Image (tube, rainbow, N blue to C red):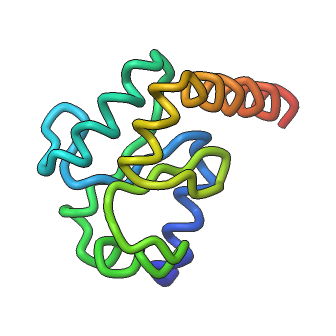
Amino acid sequence: MDVLERIQQQVDSYPIVIYMKGTPQFPSCGFSQRASQALAETGVEFAYVNVLEDPEIFENLPRFADWPTFPQLYIKGELVGGCDITLELFQNGELKTMVEDAMKGWEQSAEQG
């Protein structure tokens, strides 16, 4: 499986996934810290991929969705954006709604499947 297929599989496997430098507990850059902290503040579980531990993902994720920077937030398989967009959505209350809706849809499809 090539790296773009792996990324697609990860994005499809989790309702909410953030590709970040470091982990939510130990972020390695301020942008990743702020974005993951905003996600955590919603109270909804999310997956993360530490791009610093996977050089292939680090090198290829920017071309996966044509987004050049980290972090990258995906909800229901779609790129939402990076740190600035995540923080804006958090501040206006949309992020919580988006992640809650993603989890509801995910739980329903898991129950049916």
Q: Quadrant of residue 59?
A: bottom left
Report the residue at 33% width, 67% height from top: 69
Q: Is residue 22 left or right of residue 71?
A: left
Marks counted in the figure total: 0
Q: Is residue 75 left or right of residue 85?
A: right
Report the residue at 81% width, 34% height from top: 109
Instruction: Find the residue positioned furthest to the right.
Output: 112
Residue 90: image x %, image y %? 47, 28
Q: In which quarter of the image is residue 99?
A: top right
Residue 60: image x %, image y %? 39, 80
Q: In this view, does 17 lie above or below 64?
A: above
Judge by depth and name the residue closer to the eye, 15 or 94.
Answer: 94
Residue 98: image x %, image y %? 64, 31
Q: In this view, does 41 lie above or below 85?
A: above
Position of the C terminus, as image quadrant, is top right
Report the residue at 20% width, 62% height from top: 53
Q: In this view, does 21 lie above or below 91?
A: below
Judge by depth and name the residue closer to the eye, 32 or 58.
Answer: 32
Q: In this view, does 92 lie to the left or right of 105?
A: left
Residue 72: image x %, image y %? 42, 56
Report the residue at 52% width, 57% height from top: 10
Q: In this view, does 7 lie to the left or right of 21?
A: right
Instruction: Find the residue positioned furthest to the top.
Output: 43
Judge by depth and name the residue closer to the eye, 60 or 81.
Answer: 81
